[in-house]
Amino acid sequence: MSTAARILVVEDETHLAQGLSFNLQAEGYEVSIEGDGEGALERLAEDSFDVVLLDAMLPGKSGFEVVAELRARQSFVPVMILTARGRPEDVLLGFESGADDYLTKPFDLSILLARLNGLLRRMQWHRPKAETPSVSSASPTDVPARFGFDGRIIDFESLELYALGRMTHLTLMEADLLRYLIQNRGRIVSRKELLEQVWRLHEDTDTRAIDNFIVRLRRYLEDEPTRPVYLQTVRGVGYRFQSPSETEASEEIAGA
């Protein structure tokens, strides 16, 4: 980035916040600190930051509540949750709340910096966009930066989805889940595979947490979310993304 990225650290333990600030400033970042969720929300309403590093266990509003409120008010600043709560259920709760990344304490500084740089690279929604993006073609296993089907356009670079006469901002995790399903379009993808390949979770957990993401994506994409055409449920197994042309081909084969 041409100017120093602005980072908001939300951490109630002063020594941890100051230590993190010191290391980030040494890397060239501009750092501000807030000690609780309410203060972070007020600061973000008044000021602009490139990334928020957010502790999950805060006095008052939790980090999960903070990021959920940010997304509800249509604020899409990238958020990385930093917490000692490392169970798979907690990680999924963070992503369901709208976080873009999740790192458990204690963590290595080099890992934090690598993940932080990844968020900054993917902060594409701040770029000016044409009102109607062009669409690239793709082979059956490739997903272009802009993928279109049946009057819908997904821009994976800007994290914007154009469908049903509106534009919807996607979180990184929503975009990653949708990209993976599209990449494997026509194939049934199990919940376990989605946990491992999208969230990188290999422990036993409630794989039904995936369903909450699918419900949201259906609201963005489907004419009738309760009767999905594109994001299909395969009962007892998982999900399948099916484009209209592939649906027609499958029906022709089945009827032959």
Image: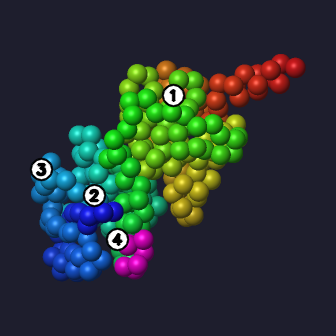
Badge count: 4
Q: Position of residue 17 (x, y in %)?
A: 20, 74
Q: Is residue 60 visible?
A: no
What's the amino acid at mark 2? Asp
Q: Which mark is residue 46?
A: 3
Q: Is residue 83 visible?
A: yes
Q: Residue at x 51, y 57 (%)?
A: 199
- Seen at 26% across and 80% down, the residue is 26
- Rate crowding at label 2 as few (under 14), some (14 to 19) or many (20 or more) other CA atoms within 10 Å: some
Which residue shows up at 58% across the image and 58% down it? 196
Q: Nearer the viewer, mark 1 or mark 4?
A: 1
Mark in front: 4 vs 2: 2
Counting residues from the N terminus, which is met first, the one under dot 1 or under dot 4?
4
The residue pinned by badge 1 equals 152
Specify the quadrant that holds the C terminus.
top right
- Name the disc covering residue 242, or none: none
What residue is at 70 percent from the left and 41 percent from the top? 139
- The local secondary structure at tag 4 comes to loop
Q: Look at label 1 and name its amino acid.
A: Arg
The span from disc 4 to disc 2 (Cα, nearest Å) is: 24 Å
Give the percent coordinates (x, y) of residue 226: 50, 24
Give me the disc on residue 50.
Answer: 2
Q: Is residue 28 above or below residue 196?
A: below
Instruction: Give the labeled residue for mark 4.
Output: 84
Tag 1–tag 4 contact (CB < 8 Å)? no
Give me the C-alpha separation between circle 3 and circle 2: 14 Å
The residue carrying pointer 1 sits among few (fewer than 14), some (14 to 19) or many (20 or more) residues within 10 Å by Cα, namely some
User: Are the residues tagged 2 and 1 within 8 Å (C-beta)?
Assistant: no
